[in-house]
Each structure stands twice: as C-alpha cells, then as structure tokens.
C-alpha cells in the first residue's frame, strides 16, 4: 500500500488491530461519528486481511458476491461468486475512498497489549513502538494464522513446501509431481488448478467433505448496468439472497431432516463429477451434511477423476526428504508439497498477546473455559476491549461482512455511549457473560455441528463449539443493535 505510513503516536483514543474487512470497517464507522483519533495497526503490507493473504490459484469466495460487500459501500461485481483479486481490489478501493488511510500503519505487528488499570488504558507494544489507547478494537481475523500439520519428518522435506495461505508464486508447478494435504475449502479450490498443470497430483484426504454445485456465472453488461443504476435493485437482489441463505439455519440448528435435499444434491454432484465407482465411494462423506462447512465446486470432482490425479485416503505416517509415506507403507515421491490444512481457529494467536485487568492473557482465561465473550464482542476482565469476529460469531451459511457490520453497530453505540456518559471504561459483567455462553452452548446441543457425527475446526479441545453463531443472523443483528450498558461494569471517572 502506497499510503504514507504515519509515525506511531504515543497515544490514541482507539487502536484498531488488523486491516481486513473488520479493521477497515471499524475505521470508517469511527470516522463517521467524528471519533477521528484512531490508529489501525496491520502486520501485513496492505489492507485486505484474508483476501490479501490467500492468493492461491482458484481462490474465490463461496458466499455470493452481493453479500460480500459492506451495505454502505456497494460494488459493481463482475460475477455471482467473486474471485480473490476482485474482493481484494474492492477492499483496497473502499479503504482508499474512505479518507482514513492516513491513520493506517502497515508492516507493524502487535506483540503485547496489556490493560493498565491505574491509567485506565491499554498499553500496546508493537514492532514499531508503544501506543497507549483507551479502546482496543481487534479485527485480526479468525482465519489468519496458518495451521501446519504435525507430521513426522515434514521439516526435513527437501522439495518446495508451502501453506495454502502463503502461496509461493515463484514455484512453477507445470510438469511437477505435487501433493496437496487437506480437502477443505481451500484445497478444493486449489486441486483443480494444480491438476491442470502438474505432471502428477496426489490429494491426501483425511475426511471427505460434502460439496454442492457452484452456481457461478459472469454478470452480463445489462445486469451490471441495471444493478448499478436502477434504484433499489441491488438492495432488493442482495436482500433476496440474504433471506434465501437464512432459510438454511433451521436445518443446521434444529431440524436436520431439512438438509436432506442438500445431501441429495451433493450426492448427484459426486455422480456428475466422477465416473469411477470406487472413487465415488471414497469421496462420499460419512457424516451429516452441514456438520463441517458445506463446500461448493463444479471442478473438484472432475479433477480427482483425472488420469494424473490420485486420491489417497490412507493416513500419512511420515514425510521423507522426497516423498509422502502412508500407513500402508506406500511412498509417493513428489517435488512440491502444498499443505491446505487450515488455520488456528479455537486457539487464536492474538489471545496470547492481550492481557486483562488481572494480568493474565486471554489465552490463559480461555484455557479453562474455551473461547468465551459477551455477544462475541466484549470480554469480562478486559475493559474497553472490542473484538470483531470474536467467539461464536462465525457462520456456515452467510457472509461474515454482515456479522462484522452488526458488531460495528454495537461497538459504535458503545463508543458513543461512553463518550456521552464520560465513562472511562466498560466491561461485561461476568455473570452476564456466563449466562450468554450457557445459552449458546445449550443451543449448540441440537445443532448439526455438535450432533452431525464429524470432527471440525468449529469445535475446541473441550468439544465445545466456540466459533459458530447458532441462530439466524437476523437475531444476531437485533441483539447487537444497541449497546446494553446495564449488562456492563462501568468504571466511573476518577482523578488521575
Ligand atoms: P480447513 O477447512 O480447516 O481444512 C483443512 C483440511 O486439511 C481438512 O481437509 C483437514 O482434514 C485436513 N488436515 C488438517 N490437518 C491434517 C493432517 N495432519 N493430515 C491430513 N489432513 C489434515 O481449512 P481451509 O480449507 O483452509 O478452510 C478454512 C476455512 O477458511 C473454511 O472453512 C472457510 O471458512 C474459509 N475459506 C473460505 C473460502 C471461500 O471460498 N470463501 C475458501 C477457503 C477457505 P479433516 O477434515 O479431517 O480435519
């Protein structure tokens, strides 16, 4: 990003961590209410978050484009499901046009953020120096830290190896022997692209995912003109898609029988894409659809069915300098190893760097209970901390941009309330937070994510689902519409 990087101030009112959808949105919304004294600290060299980092071939959104923009900054999307470059360009444009980029600092990581109870502010150490801030707003992303597989010998691999979110564009895969470990959302987009150019491709599947057809198409010029210029059309189209996606929720949360048509569609997707009966059986999941994220692709199954691809379902036992070895003793030689093994989701790295009122980190608090917060946003014992995309705000069916905007409404109302009342600090009451989480976990029991017969990144080491929102996003938006200060411990002004 070519924006001039400001010198780090010693003090700001709001420090925002991360410049993805969450951080950019927070900057825009704070500026809108005249809270201009903020700084955005971003460890990467540009805005974009996950859409800056995930540049692998085939990277695209599996949420319809129309839902993947801020409601206050619509976009002239070129197709129904957008690819990474278009989403990244959108976020760059929105940030540039917002007039807030002068308060973004790039290539700067937060190393420690500690609440100073005497001063009533956050003391934040970054790789570029220290900043004090009244409010700390984190938007560091739930899918930002690659998770590498713990496989014997992987460090000794002599060929090229990289994670899906850290794609090495210097490596030409043409004519190479390539292995992809993983069959999640990233892998199923990567595999068809690699299959087209590689001499041979091995895909290592631990668990087969459910995959629906991808109804992607380019918008015609007339459609784009109409969406841009006909008053209310884009809003109506977006609403129709939004409410259509909300109808998935009852099937996920309470009435699993409603997912039967989706399962049939996924089964027919297998039949359409794969001719070999044995391969069809290998890719057919043995758990309820929706238990893991439902994926969409028209290209993945044909790529597996291609002559130069082998699907390997035997467990990997070790990696040698030149091959992957499976439990049946087979050694498959490769030149390049792509690990598409996901992200740290329930053990978020930033949690180790944020210390609350008692000096303990969020990670230490959460090691006992699992990730927990109030309304996915505020955390008892961590005054003036606002977390975007916090615990239990993830979705399996709709757009995280909607969630982020819902949370921003809540945070902005909190900031406004704080300002008007002159409250130096707010934090949720512990008993309120406990009740919130007890209710969430009670609702989780009946969901497909808990009872669907699979292991997924939605669940933590205690088997609790601390990542997903178990209700409609309509209810999430309603619950986050206003800052409910009666649920908070308020620190009154004291002489400093
Ligand atoms: P993921 O869904 O967590 O998938 C990781 C894959 O790696 C799984 O197939 C997993 O198998 C496998 N795996 C992990 N460790 C392994 C090991 N030690 N040995 C063998 N296999 C191993 O990660 P992801 O595909 O990067 O996607 C993460 C999330 O990012 C998605 O759920 C989605 O929310 C988001 N995403 C979205 C898009 C999009 O289109 N918008 C695209 C990419 C990613 P198991 O299933 O057995 O654990």
Image (spheres, rainbow, N blue to C red):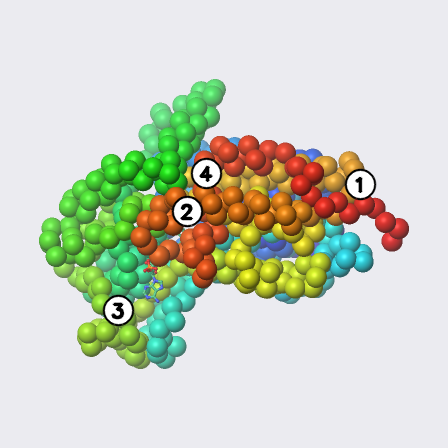
Q: Tell me the crowding category of disc 2: few under 14, some 14 to 19, or many 20 or more residues within 10 angstroms, Cα based.
A: some
The relative height of residue 198 versus residue 290 in the rendered view (above or below) is below
Quarter of the rendered structure image containing ligand 1:
bottom left
Q: Which residue in the structure is indicated by mark 3?
A: 315
Q: Residues within 10 Å of mark 1 (few under 14, many from 20)?
A: few
Spatial distance from mark 3 to mark 2, Cα to Cα? 30 Å
Calculate the distance from the C-alpha at mark 1 to the C-alpha at mark 4: 34 Å
Label 4 neighbourhood size at 10 Å, few (<14), some (14-19), many (20+)? some
Query: 429 or 302, which is in the foreground?
Result: 429
Sequence order check: which comes first, mark 4 or mark 3? Answer: 3
Q: State left or right for residue 48 relative to residue 244.
A: right
Considering only order in the chain, which callout, 4 or 1, is on the residue closer to the N terminus?
Answer: 1
- Tell me which residue sits at (50%, 38%) in the image: 402
| Relative image position of residue 135 (x, y in whole percent) | 70, 49
**Is label 4 in contact with label 3 (beta carbons under 8 Å)?**
no
Foreground mark, 3 or 2, reads: 2
Element class at badge 3: loop
In the picture of the structure, the residue carrying the numbered disc 4 is 471
Q: Which residue is mark 2?
A: 445
Would you name the residue on which mark 1 appears? 422
């Amino acid at each position: 990003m070519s924006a001039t990087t400001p010198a780090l101030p010693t003090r700001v009112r709001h420090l925002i961590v991360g410049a993805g959808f969450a951080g950019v949105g927070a900057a825009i919304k704070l500026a809108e209410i005249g809270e201009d004294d903020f700084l955005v600290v971003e460890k990467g060299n540009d805005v974009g978050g996950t859409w800056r980092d995930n540049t692998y071939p085939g990277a695209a959104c599996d949420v319809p484009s129309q839902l993947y923009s801020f409601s206050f900054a619509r976009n002239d999307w070129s197709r129904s499901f957008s690819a990474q470059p278009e989403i990244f360009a959108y976020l760059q444009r929105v940030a540039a046009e917002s007039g807030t980029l002068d308060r973004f600092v790039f290539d700067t990581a937060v190393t420690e953020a500690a609440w100073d109870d005497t001063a009533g502010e956050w003391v934040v150490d970054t790789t570029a120096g220290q900043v004090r801030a009244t409010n700390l707003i984190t938007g560091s992303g739930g899918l930002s830290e690659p998770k590498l597989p713990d496989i014997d010998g992987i460090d000794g691999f002599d060929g090229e190896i990289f994670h899906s979110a850290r794609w090495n564009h210097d490596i030409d895969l043409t004519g190479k022997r390539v292995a992809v470990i993983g069959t999640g959302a990233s892998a199923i987009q990567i595999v068809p692209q690699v299959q087209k150019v590689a001499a041979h491709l091995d895909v290592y599947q631990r668990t087969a995912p459910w995959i629906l057809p991808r109804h992607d198409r380019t918008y015609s010029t007339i459609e784009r003109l109409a969406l841009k210029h006909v008053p209310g059309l884009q809003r109506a189209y977006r609403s129709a898609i939004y409410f259509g996606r909300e109808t998935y929720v009852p099937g996920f949360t309470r009435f699993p029988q409603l997912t039967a048509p989706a399962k049939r569609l996924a089964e027919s997707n297998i039949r359409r894409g794969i001719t070999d009966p044995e391969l069809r059986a290998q890719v057919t999941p043995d758990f309820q659809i929706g238990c893991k994220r439902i994926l969409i692709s028209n290209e993945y199954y044909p790529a597996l069915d291609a002559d130069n691809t082998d699907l390997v379902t035997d467990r990997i036992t070790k990696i040698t300098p030149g091959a992957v070895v499976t439990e049946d003793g087979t050694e498959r030689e490769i030149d390049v190893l792509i690990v598409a093994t996901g992200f740290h989701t329930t053990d978020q790295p930033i949690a180790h760097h944020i210390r609350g009122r008692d000096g303990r980190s969020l990670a230490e608090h959460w090691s006992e209970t699992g990730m927990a917060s109030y309304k996915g946003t505020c955390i008892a014992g961590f005054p003036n901390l606002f977390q975007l995309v916090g615990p239990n705000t993830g979705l399996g069916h709709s757009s995280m941009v909607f969630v982020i905007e819902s949370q921003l409404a809540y945070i902005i109302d909190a900031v406004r309330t704080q300002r008007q009342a002159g409250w130096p600090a707010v934090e949720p009451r512990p008993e309120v937070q406990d009740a919130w989480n007890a209710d969430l976990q009670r609702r989780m029991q009946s969901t497909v994510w808990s009872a669907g017969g699979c292991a997924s990144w939605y669940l933590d080491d205690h088997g609790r689902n601390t990542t997903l929102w178990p209700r409609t996003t309509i209810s999430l938006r309603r619950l986050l519409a206003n800052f409910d200060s009666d649920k908070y411990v308020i620190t009154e002004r004291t002489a400093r």
